Each structure stands twice: as C-alpha cells, then as structure tokens.
Amino acid sequence: MNTLAISAQGLRKSYGDKTVLDGVDLAVPEGTIFALLGPNGAGKTTAVKILSTLVSAGPDSGPIRVGGHDLATHPQAVRRSIGVTGQFSAVDGLITGEENMLLMADLHHLSKREGRRVAAELLERFDLTEAAGKPASTYSGGMKRRLDIAMTLVGDPRIIFLDEPTTGLDPRSRHTMWQIIRELVTGGVTVFLTTQYLEEADELADRIAVLHGGKIAAEGTAEELKRLVPGGHVRLRFTDPDAYRGAASALTEAARDDEGLVLQQPSDGSQRALRELLDRLQTAGVEADELTVHTPDLDDVFFALTSTVPSQSASPSKEALR
Ligand SMILES: Nc1ncnc2c1ncn2[C@@H]1O[C@H](COP(=O)(O)OP(=O)(O)OP(=O)(O)O)[C@@H](O)[C@H]1O
C-alpha cells in the first residue's frame, strides 16, 4: 500500500507581514526520498521546521500528518517517529564522537549497555570508529555530518528530515552522504530532504518539489520535471551526405550542422515523439548513423520555474504533470 509518511495541505507560514509559505501541499509515500528544492530563502528550512514540530504552522494552514500522527494534536508522537539533521546540527564539538552518541542514547532512555551497543554499531556503520575517541570539533565537515546522521539514528526514526545534507561538502563526502541516504531508504526509512543542488535531487529523489514564491511551482519525478521545459532534442548524425540532405529536407524544423552532418530535432524525448521522428525518416528513406536523445537537465527546469513570478500563467503548474 502507498501509505503516506508525510502529508500537508495548504501549509502556510508568515513572519510578520512576510509570507514564507503560501499554501504548500505535500504528499510523501513511506520508504521514498522526497526532495524540496528551492533557492536561498525559498522557505525550505521553514517547511522542515514546521513538519518536525520545531515551529508552529500558520493558523490558516490545512491538516498536517507525519508518521501517521496529526501534527497539531499529537506533536509528541510525531517527534518520536522522526529524526532531524541539517543546518541546526546537534553535534557538540567539545565532547568526542562517542560521547555525542551516548548522550543521544541517554536522551532516548536506552540502558547503558544498550546505548553502548547502538553507539558502537552506528559509529562503525558510518566509518567513525577510529575517530570515536576524538573531540567532534576536530572532525572534517563530512565526518560531522555523518556523526549527525548517526546520532539521529539512535532513536531508530522511521522518517528523517535532512536539511541541506551536503551543503559545503567536497565531492567525495557528498557521494558518501548520498550512499548513506540511499541505504537509509533501503532499510525502509522515509527521507525528506531539502537541497539547493539540482544534481542531488536528480540523484536521490523519487519525487521533487520546486518551492518558489512560497508555493510549489512544480512537482514530479526528475524525468517529469525535465519534460516541463523546452531544450530537449534528438541529435541525428550521418556519414553519408545524401542521407543527411534527405533527412534535413524531411525534418525542416531541425537545426543543421552541414559540416558535421548533424541535425538537432527539437523533441520532448517521449516515445510518441521518437516514433513520429523515426516514421518521418523512414518515409524519406533515410537512416541516421547515430541517434541520441537529449533531455533538458534539472538546471533548465529550475531556472525556468524560479525565474518567473509563480502566479503568472506561463509558469508550469503541478496540474501540467497530470
Ligand atoms: N524566525 C524567523 N523570523 C523572521 N523571518 C524568518 C524566520 N525564519 C525564516 N525567516 C525568513 O523566511 C524566509 C525563508 O527562510 P528559510 O530559512 O526557510 O529559507 P530556505 O529556503 O531554507 O533558505 P536557505 O537555503 O538560505 O536556508 C527567509 O526570507 C527568512 O529570512
């Protein structure tokens, strides 16, 4: 069954007269990775803080459910089912990695022996056993993030919020973190992550929502989002100049590279569009030597969506995804 781990309708939040979230709907199925994508100041952290009970939602918000609990009436139950890491890290630099873990185990009322067992197991899993006896302040950025996630897992949460989990990390640490996040989901955990990195959302997320102007400007899988913006094309390369000319006269809207014998036909890359293209080539009696489909990347989507005023009708909406 497709049970929702997180759901919110008409999520609103204002600070003074500044509207940060202006009616956000969220639906995150259990055991999936959901990415909330947005530029600086879009309201990503605010959304995470509300969903994790750290700040209250605006009074005119719709219902919010997290981990099967109503957030307004059962915030304690929500807190028990979630873990939060990110910009507001829980790591204490003055004590060792192991002490940080044991402190967490105490907070979760684990017995001394159980606490030590869980701490050792998680330190091992996150490759921190060697550094466990050193003060956390001496850890690299990547190690601190790993310790932060390890600490979150002490309570065995079913839902984890990761607020910009790889901001500031070098490429290797970023890949390690991605691997960790994927493993969490394999274990059945639901991950709600915020990120400014399109590549990260593309790599990890089952579904992505783009937050802009306090609203979800678009939501879908990475592939669905990419289909929302123009920029996709099919590239056809020929070695026979006659075949190239034949194709060029059949595909009048294609951009030509007469020297390289290459045509670029605008296309959304869908099966239907490809079939139509192949039919036209067949009718013209030509065959390309190489045919590659280029879909726009998330960068194209992101800039197309966030460079417009969200209320303008030109901005693709969630409905455009069916
Ligand atoms: N406690 C607060 N009081 C007043 N304004 C706030 C408060 N918290 C956040 N804001 C404002 O709300 C807006 C959204 O902030 P938020 O931190 O949610 O954005 P974000 O998308 O997480 O950005 P970033 O990527 O920079 O962290 C910002 O304009 C911020 O100044």
Image (cartoon, rainbow, N blue to C red):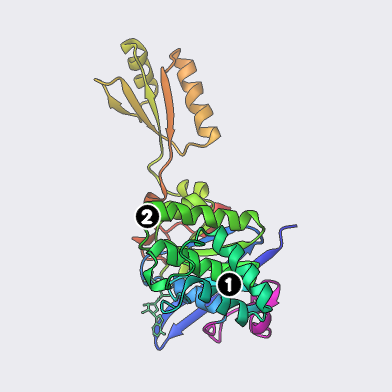
Between residues 250 and 228, which one lies in front from this camera angle?
A: 228
Within 10 Å of disc 2 (Cα), the crowding (few <14, some 14-19, many 20+) is some
Task: Determine the main secondary structure of the stretch shown in magenta.
Answer: loop
Tell me residue 285's x, y (percent): 45, 12
Asked whether mark 1 lies closer than 8 Å to ligand 1, one says no
Residue 86 inside the magenta-drawn segment: no
Q: Which residue is farthest right?
A: 1
Looking at the image, which is closer to me, 126 or 248? 126
Question: Where residue 304 is drawn, which disc sits there?
Answer: 2
Q: Does the magenta stretch include residue 56?
A: yes
x and y percent of residue 151 in the render? 55, 71
Please tell me whether mark 2 sits on a helix, a strand or a loop. Answer: helix
Note whether 196 is above or below 237 in the view shown.
below
Residue 263 on image: x %, y % = 34, 26
Quick one: label 2 or label 1, which is nearer the N terminus? 1
Tag 1 residue: 83
Q: Which of marks 2 and 1 is in front?
A: 1
**How many callouts does the rendering have?**
2
Q: Mark 2 is on which residue type? A: Ala
The segment highlighted magenta reads 54-78
- Ligand 1 sits in quadrant: bottom left
